[in-house]
Amino acid sequence: MRLRLATLVACLLAAALVQSASASATWPPATVGTAGPWIVDGEGRAVVVRGLNLVDKRPPYLPSARGWRPEVARWLRRQGFTVVRLGWIHKGLEAVRGRYDLSYLQRFVDDVRVATDAGLLVLVDLHQEAPR
């Protein structure tokens, strides 16, 4: 169940990223993937990123709870940042074993959109600290 849930979450977040990505020919790339150890664009060119980490392991486990806002994302992009690592904490979705808070998932997707709307790529960092 956990593997299927993690796969579902990853697919939903990838869809949010693609849906919000700019059609710009320069940045962000329309698609990214990997080739060996490299992150590459749709034409196979290496993508070099400059980013920062936004992983919060304190409730409510959301970047927006710590000040992640559209104006912050736009400011970072103007400063030359191109990627942000957003931490998705399983405990935010399942604080109690077997009880899922789907609003956490929606709020996290909203945080992803804040980044992508500003032209930032997103690396979703999945954390699986087990619920108590």
Image: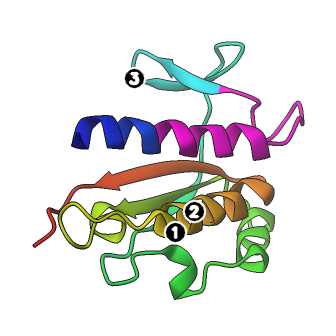
Q: Is residue 23 a member of the stretch shown in magenta? A: yes
Q: Is residue 28 above or below residue 105?
A: above
Whether residues under marks 2 and 1 lie with C-beta atoms below 8 angstroms apart, the answer is yes
Q: Residue at x 40, y 23 (%)?
A: 37
* Region of the chain picked out in magenta, as a range: 10-31
x, y percent for residue 91: 27, 68
- Give the CA distance from mark 3 to mark 2: 32 Å
Front tag of 1 and 3: 1
Query: Which of disc 3 and disc 1 is earlier in sequence?
Result: 3
Which residue is tagged 3? 37
Classify mark 1: residues with Cα within 10 Å, few (<14), some (14-19) or many (20+). Answer: few
Label 2: which secondary element: helix
- Give the CA distance from mark 1 to mark 3: 35 Å
Q: Residue at x 61, y 66 (%)?
A: 111
Mark 1: which amino acid? Answer: Ser
Q: Is residue 93 above or below residue 36?
A: below
Which residue is tagged 2? 106
The extreme front residue here reads 99
x, y percent for residue 84: 56, 58
x, y percent for residue 82: 67, 52
